[in-house]
Image (tube, coloured by chain):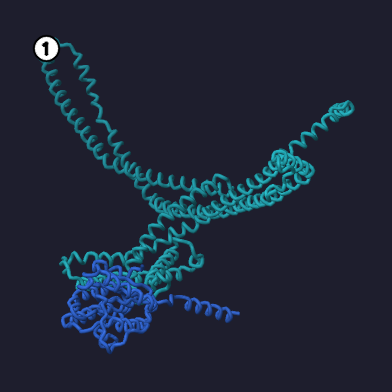
Amino acid sequence: MIKRLFLAALLLVGMAVAGCGDSRSHSNAVYMLVDTSGTYAQEAGKAQLIINYLLGTLTAGDSLMVARVTSRSFSEKDIIAKATFDSRPSQANAQKRAFKDQIDAYVKTVRGTAYTDITGGLIQGAQFLNETGAGTKTIIIFSDMQEELDKATVRNFPISLKNIRIIAVNVVKLKTDNIDPRRYLGRLDAWQKRVEGAGASEWRVINDLERLDAIFSKS
Amino acid sequence: MTGSEYWMVWPANTAVSVLVVLLVAMAFLYAARKPVHHLIGSLGFLISGPLRIGARWLLAAANDMTQRNKAVLLAHGRQEVEQRIEREFERLGAMVTRDLQGYPALQRKLLDEITRVEEDYKKCGEVPPPPPEWVEAVTAMANVKSTGNEMVQKVLGEINRSVTSIHDKALADYRRAYETRHKILEGFMPFWRSLDKTMAQVDKKLTGLQSSTAAVDAHMEKFEQINAKTDKAEHALTVSAFTQFAIAFLVMAVASGGAFVNFKLIALPMSEMVGAGDYISSSLRTSEVAALVIIFVEASMGLFLMESLRITHLFPRIANLNEHMRHRMMWIALTLLVTLAGIEAALALMRDMLISDKQALLHSLATVQQAATDGWVARIPTAGQMLLGFILPFALAFIAIPLESLIYSTRTVGGVLLAGFVRTLAFVLRILGNLARRLSRVLINLYDVVIVLPLLIEHLVKAPRASAPGKSRRGADAEA
């Protein structure tokens, strides 16, 4: 009788332990694409500000990756810095300091590229984010959203951005946009359709860098 | 004829058609009067019956609950008063032992002082010796008539001189004697004071004893009332329970505030131990649960400490432990509590360090430079947090006392409220039952109003029969 009771108690404890804990991931993973093509490379200082904001906002257990957008961005070589912050806050702070140093070093040596492969960066970002298994996955595109590809680069195929939030930041207006604003609006519409068609959970544009808190706010 | 005119007897004349239909309907309704009355009455009874039964059952249950509550309340009150009387007797015993132990010495001192005062008083009573007998001779000599004899005058002069000197000497002796008596009387003062002080001391002790016995009397009266199960005792105990409940609730609310501050102090540093990324539920971090567990463990240790100190009596098993085991348990609980308090102080320090580190990181990320702060001023919050972290577990330990009051008073308060609720429910059911019955009667009357025409005819037909001679005579006979 006692043995049965003991087994029942053990079973109950086991069930309680198994039931205890939320298996869903509550961590954030952010992949930031920094456009360095042409004149936009001059905006790198602003990108640094956004990265600093992300470092200050992301908590222990979250992941942050920063990659540059080059002529062909679907490459690990374009990743400037990446880190999954330790679950201990003190260790996470140390990692953030190291991350900041890497970004600072990159900003000093940034050089402009001939073409702008945003799609390649998105594909790579989606892959990395899915590997983290984070609960909330976000790709931040720091670019004017004007994609320019060389003739050899192929990007006109369907991509998957399922359950990923896409946020375009600092989408500056080009000279041609000033002549005809429909070009700018049309460009943004085209990107929205493309990412939403690829399964993105959200599309957002943030041009005011004072409103960066909108990066993590749910729409 | 349209679809809506199918019921018209004379489609051309609506009023006549309506009238005919009404008359026919009335005839049918009149014919069905008794069964319909019976049906409505049955329906009313069908609804009101169970409601009234339910009301009666609830009322009986409420009375039963009240009786049970009363029994529990009186038993608890009896136990409490017994304990109080026991404590009062213990106090009284201690007081009697303490005061009457020194009473023989006090009495001896008093007697000594009284004897001494008496002796001194007797000394004061000694009068100076009476004048010598020769005073009478001098009086006789003074009565001798002066004849102008020189010899006699000389003798009288000598006698006058001698008497004057003796008088002066006697007066001086008399004054000295008085002076001595005054000195003795002056020497009385400290003894009087001591006597007065001793008497005041005796009076104070006796008054204390008297007030304690008065308190015992009051408790005994209460105890007798509880034993007699009087309504007064029940009412007093109920009011006392409500007051206890309110006070305990208030104290528990304050303690909850303390626990919340405690939680805030250790939740962040706990993430350093168990990790910040684990979640129990969508909004509850594992580190927060760990912090809560620590606080609950501290409260439990405080509870065990209070139990082993016999301040609270929530666990009979602990109260029944022998002295040796109880002491051992008390020391174990105290040691664990001190250890946890130490851990909390360390966690509070770690919290401060983590916040400082985070601040430093944010400042390094921001473009604005960090403002310089004074060294010792910046340490005040750290010291305050550590102190709070160490003190709060001990403060939380005292939750056991209001918790016990809350548990015991909740039984009474909950019982009274539940009985009140059941009574109210019974009242509502009774009202609904009565309403259903009355409604059925109203419906019956309403039915009769609808068929008023046939009823009038019936009345007109039956009236002559009722007023017939035979019938009236029969009626008169019946009345007689």
Q: Residue at x 21, y 70 (%)?
A: A179
Q: Nearer the viewer, residue A98 or B88?
A: A98
Tell me which chain the residue with mark 1 is part of.
B
Q: Residue furthest right?
A: B470
Examine the image and state in which quarter residue A196 appears: bottom left
Q: Is residue B454 above or below residue A61?
A: above
Residue at the spot of label 1 = B149
Does residue B276 appear in the picture of this structure?
A: no
**Percent coordinates x, y for residue B7 in the rendering:** 72, 47
Residue B275: x and y in percent read 35, 77
Q: Kindly indicate which chain is depicted in blue in the rendered structure.
A: A
Task: Judge by depth and name the residue closer to the eye, A65 or A47.
Answer: A47
Instruction: Give the answer, above or below, for where B411 lies relative to B288.
Output: above
- Secondary structure at badge 1 equals loop
**Where residue B29 appears, x then y in whole percent?**
76, 43
- Chain B display color: cyan
Of residue B167 and residue B407, the one placed in the foreground of this image is B407
Q: Quadrant of residue B250?
A: bottom left
Q: Amino acid at mark 1?
A: Asn
Instruction: Answer with the quarter of the image where residue B335 lies.
Output: bottom left
